[in-house]
Amino acid sequence: MDKEVKLVVLIDVQTGKANEQIRLFKTLQPLVLEEEGCFEYELHKVSDNDDQLVLTERWASEAAWHAHHETPHMKEASKLTPSFRAGPTKVLRLDLV
């Protein structure tokens, strides 16, 4: 049985450009949730920082998570993010203790 993948993705956007990230997410979310093995794909605002967002993801397996990055919608999204992100995301992979 494959091990579930749980992620927290920290996203910093350029000042005043959070809405661009949010709009892109709202376009992607239904597509991602339809992907095989996707259990969760949610975007959250950081309460005290308008330029930081947090994405939480849960995948059935490592293979499902890797396949997600190869979908046409994610490849297209990757082309758009440099126009509003302040830098690369930081991906935190979570393990139960």
Image (cartoon, rainbow, N blue to C red):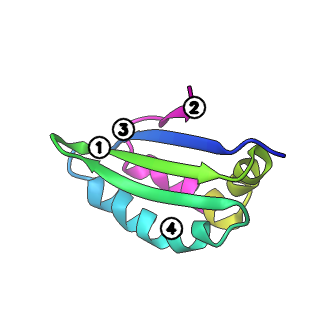
**Viewer-side residue, 97 vs 87:** 97
Identify the element where label 3 is drawn.
loop
Q: Residue at x 75, y 44 (%)?
A: 62
Which is nearer the N-term, disc 3 or disc 4? 4
Q: Tell me, for residue 96, which label it has, or none.
A: 2
Q: What residue occupies the far top of the structure in this picture?
A: 97
Identify the element where label 2 is drawn.
loop
Query: To which residue does mark 4 refer?
Result: 29
Identify the element where label 1 is drawn.
loop
Q: Tell me, for residue 86, which label it has, or none.
A: 3
Query: To which residue does mark 1 refer?
Result: 14
Tell me how far mark 3 sits from mark 1, CA to CA.
Answer: 5 Å
Asked whether disc 3 touches disc 1, contact meaning CB atoms under 8 Å apart, the reply is: yes
In the image, taking residue 50 as reference, residue 68 lies left or right, namely right
Which residues make up the magenta segment? 76-97
Q: Tell me, for residue 28, which label it has, or none.
A: none
Tell me how far mark 4 sits from mark 1, CA to CA.
Answer: 21 Å
**Viewer-side residue, 87 vs 46:** 46
Q: Is residue 52 magenta?
A: no
Which is nearer the N-term, disc 3 or disc 1? 1
In the image, taking residue 71 as reference, residue 57 lies left or right, namely left
**What amino acid does circle 4 point to?**
Gln
Tell me how far mark 3 sits from mark 4, CA to CA.
Answer: 21 Å
Which is nearer the N-term, disc 2 or disc 4? 4
